[in-house]
Amino acid sequence: MLHFNPVYQKELRTTARSLRTYIIIFAFNGLLSLFGLFALYLTFEYQQNLGKNVQYSAILEIYSIITGVEFFLLMLVVPAVTAGAISGEKERQTLEILLTTRLTSGSIIRGKLLASISMMLILAFSSLPVIALVFSIGGITLRDLGEFMVLILETAIYLGSIGIFFSVLLKKSTSATVAAYGTVLLLSLGTFGGVWGIHFLTQMHLNHMAPDATAVMQADIGNWMLLLFVNPIATFLSILKGQAGTGRSLADLYGKFGNLSPGLNEHWFLLSAGIQIAISILLLLLSARILNPLKGNKGKSKHNKIK
């Protein structure tokens, strides 16, 4: 008989009974549907009213818009859902009771994270009918949808582990939420800004070294481009380029900043996803250690006494 995490089971029951869950699902799919229908209108009806021919290649652009909106909403929802997972228990003064059970701190962390990921998967699967608007017309395959679902799962784990970490580290849900959003903002926009800043300073140095040069030397920031491996937006752009061809690859987007090897550019999604999952595992291990640093040792000492 399968053994399910008790914390996960409890969180699922609470989520299923909460009105907040249905409001989130309705708002999520409502916004996604509005963007999808508006994009379809601009592509077909509006173009025909102007007397222009419908370009069916624009269907892929619709797919990019819908998946982009869904990914953006995911980045907004995940930190808010996970940041209050443990800090909420602290505020309700139920964490101490939870820690006195036979559950390890790692089991508590995994249960909270699994509940949050399940919520994200519910949102992702509930949005499939909206994405199917594009799929029914053509241009997108089942493999593309599968890859996008894998991206959603990986990003949910990555951002969820950040929210869980700050939820364990801080006492208030508000502080944990602000810290989680700040970290996500730093990883997404901050790394883009960092790459641009390093290129700007390198270019200034080159101009200072050769101010009278007739040919303008282009700065190459080299391996600093690898900072974008931790950027979830860069990961999304890499998979979008391979699927729809409408997203600009990192080599095109930052070609003037440096030279990306073809291997890195081709396998960017796998490499960045692997690094982000590794960071997630590290954050979850740290969260379990911070939550109750003695519980694991107590279990080991009891086991040694029995021996």
Image (tube, rainbow, N blue to C red):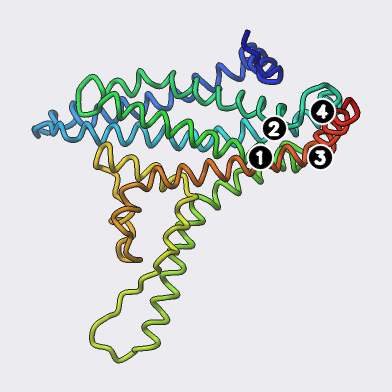
Pointer 4 with pointer 2, Cβ within 8 A: no
The answer for how far apart the CA atoms under marks 4 and 3 are is 14 Å
Residue under label 4, please give it.
Answer: 95
Q: Quadrant of the C terminus?
A: top right
Pointer 4 with pointer 3, Cβ within 8 A: no
Label 2 crowd bin: few (<14), some (14–19), many (20+), radius 10 Å:
many
Identify the residue at the far front of this view: 307
Helix, strand or loop at disc 4? Answer: helix
Is residue 141 shown above or below 261? above
Camera-nearest residue between 55 and 205: 205
Helix, strand or loop at disc 2? Answer: loop
The answer for how far apart the CA atoms under marks 1 and 3 are is 23 Å
**Which one is in front in this view, the residue at disc 1 or the one at disc 3?**
3
Camera-nearest residue between 60 and 258: 258
Pointer 4 with pointer 1, Cβ within 8 A: no
The residue at the point 51 percent across, 44 percent down is: 276
Q: Amino acid at mark 2?
A: Gly
**Which one is in front in this view, the residue at disc 4 or the one at disc 1?**
4
Determine the image quadrant of residue 80: top right
Helix, strand or loop at disc 1? Answer: helix
Residue under label 2, please give it.
Answer: 84
Q: Mark 4 or mark 3, which has the lower sequence index?
A: 4
Helix, strand or loop at disc 3? Answer: loop
Camera-nearest residue between 278 and 173: 278
Q: Amino acid at mark 1?
A: Thr
Pointer 2 with pointer 1, Cβ within 8 A: yes
